[in-house]
Amino acid sequence: MSTILKEILAANEAYAKDFGDKGNLPMPPGRHFAIVTCIDARLDPAKFAGLREGDAHVFRNAGGRVTEDAIRSLVVSYKLLGTREWFVIHHTDCGMEYADSATINSLLAQSLKPAKLDEQGWHDTKDNSGTTDGEFINWLTIDDPIRSVCVDVKRLRSHPLVPGYIKIYGYLFDVKTGILNEVPEATKIGKEI
């Protein structure tokens, strides 16, 4: 058993001892909102948004992008579970800013092992374990974080399964200060229609 697995199981055992009546929380989120944000380990939506179990839906993916799966999840979130407000939250210094789709595809073609980033760029082991299947994925890399928030809010606002009464906000989390900064252009795009 790995050290990480042991640590997680021990933490879960301690958590379950104090679980209390959380087993009685209703399925719909109590505060009726959802967040789409990045997988970056420096972001803790429960802390930066003041969440407790049962408060909100939180969807995470690389870059916090509004993918087809994020849209699927958000539609379920409002249609079946009653969310009425959505937050698209990207962040500063996102790893998705450090590579474009061509770079990611090239790295995957060279090796399936983790790549390394240094002053000269991305490097791989070139161990011939790579694949070209990655060429078919839109990696949704980020060249401008403010623009990416706007693009994602627009993707939601213009989607035929997203009703006009859903409020959609765009924010950029600053990883150096912990502050959520509104992207006014994105929030304007996301206004109720």
Image (spheres, rainbow, N blue to C red):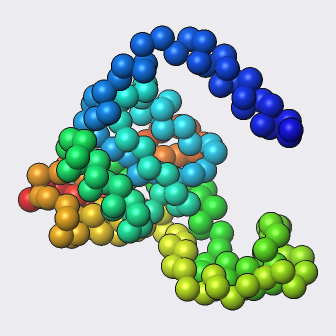
Is 164 left, or right, of 85 in this rendering?
left
Can the viewer see residue 85 in this picture?
no
Image position of 53 with respect to 114: above or below: above
Is 92 left, or right, of 71 in this rendering?
right
Please state the horizontal and vertical placement of residue 179, each as a whole percent of the image: 47, 38
Which quadrant is the N terminus positioned in? top right
Which of these two is toward me, 155 or 10?
Answer: 10
Residue lying at 61% horizontally and 78% vertically, measured from the top left: 100
Task: State the count of labels.
Answer: 0
Can the viewer see residue 145 in this picture?
yes
Q: Residue furthest left?
A: 193
Q: Which picture quadrant has residue 124?
A: bottom right
Please state the horizontal and vertical placement of residue 82, each as a whole percent of the image: 21, 41
Residue lying at 52% horizontally and 15% vertically, measured from the top left: 19
Is 97 left, or right, of 192 in this rendering?
right
Image position of 101 with respect to 114: above or below: below
Residue lying at 74% horizontally and 23% vertically, measured from the top left: 10
Please state the horizontal and vertical placement of residue 5, each as a whole percent of the image: 78, 37
Q: Which picture quadrant has residue 54?
A: top left
